[in-house]
Every structure is written in structure tokens, then in C-alpha cells.
Image (cartoon, rainbow, N blue to C red):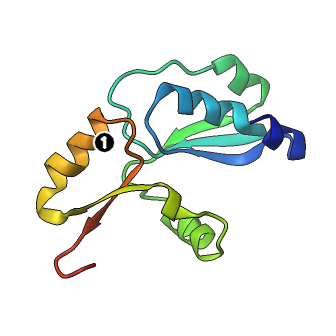
Amino acid sequence: MERILALNGGVEVAYECAGAEVTVGNAVSSIRKGGEVVIISIIPQPVAVDMLQLTVKEASIRTSFAYRHIFPEVIGLIAAGRIDVKQVVTAKIELDNIVEDGFKKLLTDKSQAKILVRLSGDN
């Protein structure tokens, strides 16, 4: 975190993807003045947010359900090689198992980051 802040004063946008209070706090801490935190994870219980830090940074925080508005930007970053998604994929599951092995696991097991769902016939 200190390295990011020292390089350029923080990031313009921080995507919180883990759904844990500590990562929400890290996202807030990592943004620069005028930055934005985008919560794209499922957070099943209330979390504390440092509103003073957001106010001092004149930053904003927003949420997105099912990545509705951010897919084009994230796909562009992945395509450009600016995000290495292989490191965050923690499991690959079949579509038939999406509830038990997907949603429930994401809500109960914080070691899970991204679970890819294989459609019929995918490898």
C-alpha cells in the first residue's frame, strides 16, 4: 500500500472484490484524492468504512451488482495485460454446482476470490 501511495498518491479507482472489511479498508486507503472505490463483491454483513478518509480525499464509493457497468473497462484492462486474472481464480466449477460450490462458498469461505463457472462442454 505504501508503495502505491508513494508512486503516485494512490490509484484512481480501487475495485474491492473479496467482500471482507479489511479489503474495503485497503481499497479506501489506496485511492488518491478524488478517487473512487467500487465494491463488486458480495458482502453478506455490514462493514465499517472510514468515512473521514473518504471525505478528506473527496472520494466516492459505489457498488455494482453482477458487474453490470464495469465489464467493458475490466475486459479492456485484462485484454491489455494490465490485470493478471490467473492469480485470483481460486476454483473452477460446473454450472450444475453453482449454488453449493459457487455462491455458498463465496459467502462462507473468504479464501475464495473468483470462481469460474464452466458451461456445458467448456474446459
**Identity, as a three-letter code, of the amino acid under mark 1:** Leu
Q: Is residue 83 visible?
A: yes
Choose between 39 and 60: the one closer to the eye: 39
Please name the residue that numbered disc 1 is placed on: 106
Choose between 45 and 1: the one closer to the eye: 1
Choose between 52 and 30: the one closer to the eye: 30
Residue 63, given in percent of the width and then of the height, sits at 48, 42
Looking at the image, residue 57 sits to the left or right of residue 65; the answer is right
Residue drawn 45% across and 47% down? 64
Q: Quadrant of residue 52?
A: top right
Choose between 30 and 94: the one closer to the eye: 94
Q: Quadrant of residue 106?
A: top left
Q: Secondary structure at mark 1?
A: helix
Q: Is residue 38 above or below residue 68?
A: above
Residue drawn 51% across and 18% down? 48
Residue 87, given in percent of the width and then of the height, sits at 52, 58
- How many numbered circles are shown? 1
Q: Residues within 10 Å of mark 1 (few under 14, many from 20)?
A: many
Give the quadrant of the C terminus. Answer: bottom left
Residue positioned most to the bottom = 121
Residue drawn 14% across and 57% down? 97
Give the quadrant of the N terminus. Answer: top right
Residue positioned most to the left = 96
Q: Is residue 70 visible?
A: no
Q: Is residue 37 above or below residue 75?
A: above
Residue drawn 17% across and 64% down? 95
Residue 122, given in percent of the width and then of the height, sits at 25, 79
Residue 109, given in percent of the width and then of the height, sits at 31, 36
Q: Is residue 2 above or below residue 71?
A: above
